[in-house]
Image: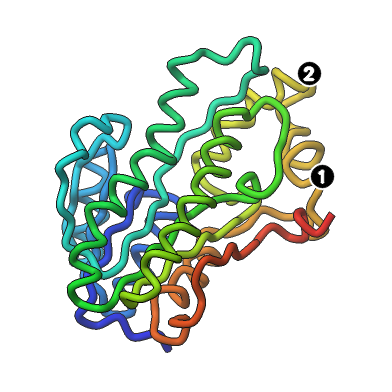
Amino acid sequence: MTDLTGKRAIVTGGASGIGLAIAGAFAEAGAHVVIADLNAEAASQAAAGLGGEAWAVDLGDTAALGDLSLDADILVNNAGIQHVRPIEEFEPERFSLLLRIMLEAPFLLIRAALPGMYERGFGRVINVSSVHGLRASPYKSAYVAAKHGLEGLSKVTALEGGPHGVTSNCINPGYVRTPLVEKQIADQAKVHGIPEAEVVDRIMLTESAIKRLVEPAEVASLALWLAGADSRMVTGASYTMDGGWSAR
């Protein structure tokens, strides 16, 4: 089993969904977990339940992150939002917000954490990307652009961090059973012109060979392995967990 005793892990978007599952797995493995989330109350509740600490942070306010310094052995860039619109209707500010949260903020957090990781000769950067970091879907221009950028950022981090004992990898799930996915259903139904009840089968699972949603605990199990000692030669990689979607 992976032992993270003595390690300090920061998980963004850690108060719910994938982030909470990862934080729980890390805490169970012995790590001290920092729950970073926009929702201060939810972050505090999650941290209390895991014996960790909360960090209320707005990752969309990237100007406030420029001078940040982070003490972390493990950094999980997981926070994300979604917005479904055709390009010609996509609001520019909303496009910018998605890129700030899911690409610029990860860069700034990695930048803030690397000096300490380099000093200790150990670090794990785990970027929760998506199958949309490798493939595209219509009506998700900002999300796809941000996740494709995150893939590149992760690889550069791997190349720079390798000589210092720091690895950087992406996890690429398909649709995961989280509040973020549930909130998409109405928008997906609208842009595709179908009933909400048909969205999961006709849109979300149409490319997957395994016809079910990914569970947060499954993503957390891979993140836990990537955080441990057994993955020390794994870096610059993108691990799909998409039921076969990207095999097409």
Residue 127 screen position, x and y as percent: 45, 56
The residue where tag 1 is placed is: 206
Residue 104, how many percent across, how many down? 37, 38
Residue ID at (46%, 51%): 153
Q: Name which residue lies at 81% across and 37% down.
A: 202
Please name whichever residue, 170 or 224, is drawn nearer the observer in this view of the structure.
Answer: 170
Residue 159 location in percent, x, y? 45, 65
The answer to whether 72 appears left or right of 139 in the picture is left
Give the number of marks: 2
- Note whether 195 is above or below 42 in the view shown: above
Task: State which quadrant residue 168 falls in.
Answer: bottom left
80 relative position to 181: left or right: left
Residue drawn at the location 20% of the way across and 42% of the way down: 56
Q: Which quadrant of the rendered structure holds the N terminus?
A: bottom left
Residue 114 against residue 104 in the figure, above or below: below
Quadrant location of the C terminus in the rendered image? bottom right
Q: Give SS at disc 2.
A: loop
User: Taking 80 as reference, is 89 left or right?
Assistant: right
Q: Please, is residue 31 above or below residue 38 in the view?
A: below
Q: Residues within 10 Å of mark 2 (few under 14, many from 20)?
A: few
Looking at the rendered structure, the secondary structure element under dot 1 is loop
Alpha carbon separation for disc pair 2 and 1 = 16 Å
What type is the residue that disc 1 sits on? Thr
Amino acid type at image mark 2? Gly
Q: Residue at x 32, y 56 (%)?
A: 11
Specify which label sits upstream in the sequence, 2 or 1: 2
Q: Quadrant of residue 143?
A: top right
Q: In the drawing, what numbered circle is on residue 193?
A: 2
Q: Are marks 2 and 1 in contact (CB under 8 Å)?
A: no
Q: Which mark is residue 31?
A: none
Mark 1 residue crowding within 10 angstroms, few (<14) / some (14–19) / many (20+): few
- Is 241 above or below relative to 79? below
